[in-house]
């Protein structure tokens, strides 16, 4: 539960009449009557009418650019530690989209596992995968921890959850509020459900659920019934931030203060056009750099890791634009070039 002393404005306090008990704090991201919301001004995701305007009107006025040739998005052979990296080493391996194998504290952590061919409830329609997973499921090392940021189809895949539950039955899953039953129904044995700012231990790791600005839905009738989040993973003095999927919001500084300092910040840099529709839920590269600077108190120590681009084409920017735009914005901000890493699919980096 968030601590009121450091929380955003908007908390409500309730007590039972005649009760001497301490008041109960309702976090502002909890929607009255059930469900969840973004608690910041300007953070309301677009409605269905906006989606129709984008798909039926904007696309006629401003058609999407053609996809780049397959060679524009490379896949390289991953080289993670096997079966695990040394406890004092962090390795980051990009499988694709928001899926990373993070090796920290001698444990193997998987983020937003997505091995499906489409980000869709249907096998024959919806955004299809443009780049195959850089590591086959059966080639993963033993998985100790799985982190899930929210329930959208490009981040939470039914078949992938079932396959991981079979292959790695002892893995501990950490999910935001409302998603425990989903993963348990697909075979996951060990699952912890966290609200923002809650912590859990996983062996030598401390896992913290942290705020994000997004929304949730897997169908027309369940919008925002489950929570969304980002994650901080710590092993003593070493820590990694996984941004999940998020628009730019005012809590990145608080995350850095409360859960940092970070050795690496994994931040989404794609799926941002058109801005009038995507701004509340997806950062563009310039906003991702602002988030990084807030997370890292100016941005001179942690590694910026760009993700959430090149695997699925979800929005209108060219598939290969996010890395170029991020590199340009990084240079314009005067940040150290050695602190920027936009991996190729499959690339591994050791810290």
Image (cartoon, rainbow, N blue to C red):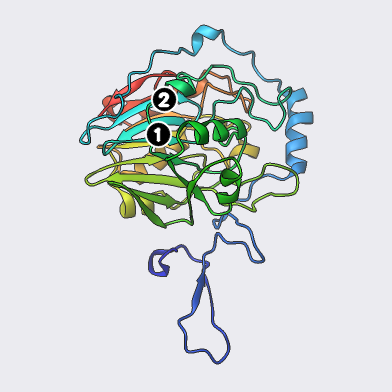
Q: Is residue 349 visible?
A: yes
Which circle marks residue 29 in the picture? none
Q: Which of the 4 quarters of the picture holds residue 31? A: bottom right
Residue closest to the eye, 27 or 319: 27
Going 43% across and 63% down the picture, which residue do you hit? Answer: 2
Residue 316: image location, x then y, percent? 63, 25
Q: Is residue 196 above or below residue 303?
A: below
- Helix, strand or loop at label 1? It is loop
Which residue position holds label 2? 140
Question: In this image, 35 relative to 139: left or right?
Answer: right
Residue 154: image location, x then y, percent? 59, 32
Question: In this image, 2 relative to 296: left or right?
Answer: right
Which residue position holds label 1? 143
Decide: marks 2, 1 in contact (CB < 8 A)?
A: yes
Q: CA distance from mark 2 to mark 1?
A: 7 Å
- Mark 1 Cα within 10 Å, few/some/many (few <14, many 20+)? many
Residue 147: image location, x then y, percent? 45, 41
Going 51% across and 27% down the picture, which residue do you hit? Answer: 97
Residue 203: image location, x then y, percent? 31, 47
- Mark 2 Cα within 10 Å, few/some/many (few <14, many 20+)? some
- Helix, strand or loop at label 2? It is loop
């Amino acid at each position: 539960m968030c601590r009121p002393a450091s929380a955003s404005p908007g908390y409500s306090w309730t007590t039972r009449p005649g009760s001497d008990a301490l008041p109960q704090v309702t976090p502002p991201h909890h929607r009255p009557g059930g469900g969840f919301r973004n608690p910041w001004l300007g953070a309301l995701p677009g409605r269905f009418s906006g989606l129709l305007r984008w798909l039926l009107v904007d696309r006629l006025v401003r058609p999407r650019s053609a996809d780049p040739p397959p060679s524009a998005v490379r896949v390289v052979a991953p080289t993670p530690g096997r079966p695990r990296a040394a406890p004092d080493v962090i390795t980051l391996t990009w499988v694709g989209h928001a899926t990373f194998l993070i090796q920290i504290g001698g444990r193997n952590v998987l983020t937003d596992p997505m091995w499906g061919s489409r980000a869709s409830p249907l096998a024959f329609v919806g955004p299809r995968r443009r780049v195959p997973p850089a590591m086959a499921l059966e080639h993963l090392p033993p998985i100790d921890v799985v982190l899930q940021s929210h329930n959208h189809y490009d981040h939470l895949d039914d078949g992938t959850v079932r396959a991981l539950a079979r292959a790695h039955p002892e893995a501990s899953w950490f999910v935001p509020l409302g998603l425990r039953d989903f993963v348990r129904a697909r075979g996951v044995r060990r699952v912890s459900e966290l609200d923002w700012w809650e912590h859990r231990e996983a062996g030598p790791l401390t896992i913290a659920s942290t705020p994000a600005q997004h929304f949730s839905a897997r169908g027309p009738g369940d919008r925002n019934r489950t929570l969304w989040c980002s994650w901080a993973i710590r092993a003593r003095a070493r820590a990694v931030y996984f941004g999940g999927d998020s628009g730019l919001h005012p809590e990145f500084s608080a995350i850095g203060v409360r859960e940092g300092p970070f050795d690496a910040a994994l931040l989404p840099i794609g799926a941002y056009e058109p801005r009038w529709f995507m701004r509340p839920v997806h950062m563009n590269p310039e906003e991702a750099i602002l988030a990084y600077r807030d997370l890292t108190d100016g941005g001179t120590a942690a590694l910026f890791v760009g993700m959430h681009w090149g695997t699925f084409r979800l929005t209108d920017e060219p598939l290969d634009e996010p890395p170029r735009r991020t590199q340009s914005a990084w240079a314009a901000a005067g940040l150290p070039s050695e602190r920027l890493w936009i991996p190729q699919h499959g690339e591994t980096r050791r810290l």
